[in-house]
Amino acid sequence: MIELKQLTRVFGERTAVDQLNLTVNSGEICALIGTSGCGKSTTLKMINRLIEPTSGTVLINGEDIRDQSPELLRRRIGYAIQGVGLFPHRSVYDNIATVPRLLNWSRQEIDARVRELLELLKMPFETFAHQYPHRLSGGEQQRIGVARALAARPELLLMDEPFGALDPLTRERLQGELKQIQRMLGITVILVTHDMEEAIRLADQVAVMDAGRLLQSGTPQALLRNPREGFVSQLVGGEDRALRLLALRRVDELVQPLDQLSFEAELPTVSSGMSLRDALARHLWYGQNCLRVVDDAGNTLGGISLDAILNAEDQRP
Amino acid sequence: MMRSLAVTWVGTLAPLACLLYLAVAASTLEPLLMPLAPEGAPTIYARDSFINLIGWHLMLVFIAIASASIIAISAAILVSRPAGRDFLPLARSLANLGQTLPPVAVLALAVPAVGFGAWPTLIALFLYGLLPIFENTLAGLSQVSAEVKEAARGLGMSPLQRLWQVELPLALPVIITGVRLSIIISVGTATIGSTVAAKGLGEVIIAGLLTDNLAFVLQGGIIVALMAMVLDALLRKVEQKIRRT
Ligand SMILES: Nc1ncnc2c1ncn2[C@@H]1O[C@H](COP(=O)(O)OP(=O)(O)OP(=O)(O)O)[C@@H](O)[C@H]1O
Ligand SMILES: [Mg+2]
């Protein structure tokens, strides 16, 4: 568990972060979101002591981060940034090996770990390990940046706009990979973004900041359903809110037996793992009131009706 | 590709071959240079062997530039740290002073203090060599991107580790350019050391000037020029090699 308590940072006249309180549960992804200059990066950097707070504390599993030297603390916390900042004079292998080497791991351990991480990120060892960063695409560099951050098996990963500079398709793919990896490793992630879609897609908890203050924090659903007046409402979007909420729920929540529905013979299908938003799009595309729901193997599970989706928010779990 | 390879090799090897030839077999050029020497005077400098003089000359240059490198690089590192930032203007003006004082004036000032011989020459070359190395080290360190430096810090490298493992390796090609410039300048400048009795090729040139022997002046001048060319080509190669990785 990560606890930020009354965290404040003042630069000269300017209060970049103002008495911020935030708790992030272990094994969850927390997205810090807000407009440019609202203090997201400053907050993040106070967690690994790249910036020292003017006042307030950060506790990691109950331990004050100031009990440890900044260097030792940072070697325990993964850190990935938008500019990636791969070392241009070091190969992919040596970049990933940075923190394990600082921690004096043995050569065999390091070798095994680099192979494991490249595999996890679907980058073949033979192709990539001995490349230099300037030969990689932006998306590949970003992956290596994440691999480097994860190298010493940190329990906490801090990411500052990790996908900001990528095209939408690559960004979406990497977001998917990140979520998968995070679930698999069970690590805690605190991620800075100014993209609401990204926050909703990835996060278990979204924390909205403005002018150095925390305005509201909660699950994406909670934020979308009951945003506080003003900035938060504006950020989660007026009409888009309904669609964003649907994007958070899956088709299998609303499956009905097919015989309850009046349907025609050859219904188009949707898969049970799809989001309700995508299912709605398919209803509209095919001009149907009802679609057949199938699982990954192609077996029919039932049907989903347009009405059910339109009323989804009234019968929410 | 083939062609550029051939060109670079000719660029390095041709001056080296000429230099070696002059060093060991200058006497074979006697007929060629004869017309330039006064009647009855020797054509080829014979008071010392060229090998010896080249050796002395290079030694002066290397000792002076090695010390200048140590001092200038350390100073540049210090003033580029947060704690040393206040000393940047001071260090910069000292290095500038070293460059603006003419080496001849330095010799004249140094002789009363340290006597004749190699010492005053070393001091002059040292002072003259500081500025390019200092400025290039500063430029090299400052061009390391902010993101790379932040990553190094965020991953938990100590200040010393960041310097040795990230900043210096990334600045190295630019630093070597500075060292190369200083070496080239000081190969030429070292010739004036002979006016205060430092061993070196200046001796040949000065002997030629004193006796109106153009052959001597030409021999000394050509050997010095060839030395500068060989060193320049070698260091350029080193630079390229580092840049490529
Ligand atoms: N080292 C610093 N010195 C002075 N002011 C700073 C420093 N770092 C940040 N600030 C100021 O603090 C405020 C918050 O900056 P911060 O980098 O945390 O914003 P951010 O939310 O990450 O913005 P962005 O989305 O643009 O990255 C800004 O007004 C910035 O100018
Ligand atoms: Mg930022």
Image: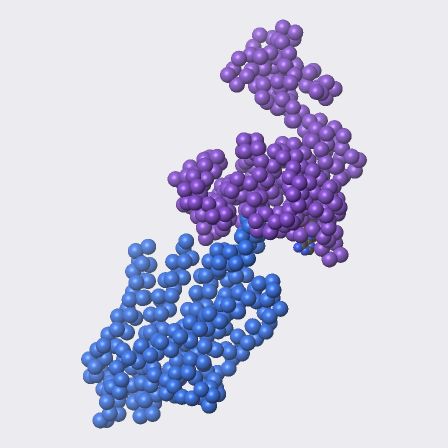
Chain colours: A purple, B blue
Q: Is residue B116 visible?
A: yes
Q: Residue at x 19, y 80 (%)?
A: B28
Q: Is residue A114 left or right of residue A162?
A: left
Q: Where A128 sits versus A285, above or below? A: below
Q: Residue at x 67, y 25 (%)?
A: A246
Residue A279 at x, y percent in the picture: 62, 21
Q: Where A117 sits versus B190, above or below? A: above
Q: Is residue A13 left or right of residue A278?
A: right
Q: Is residue A41 visible?
A: no
Residue B53 at x, y percent in the picture: 30, 80
Q: Is residue A266 left or right of residue A57?
A: left
Q: Residue furthest right?
A: A229
Residue B119 at x, y percent in the picture: 42, 83
Quadrant of the snapshot with the N terminus of chain A: top right
Residue B30 at x, y percent in the picture: 21, 83
Q: Residue at x 50, y 73 (%)?
A: B131
Q: Where A275 sits versus A9, above or below? A: above
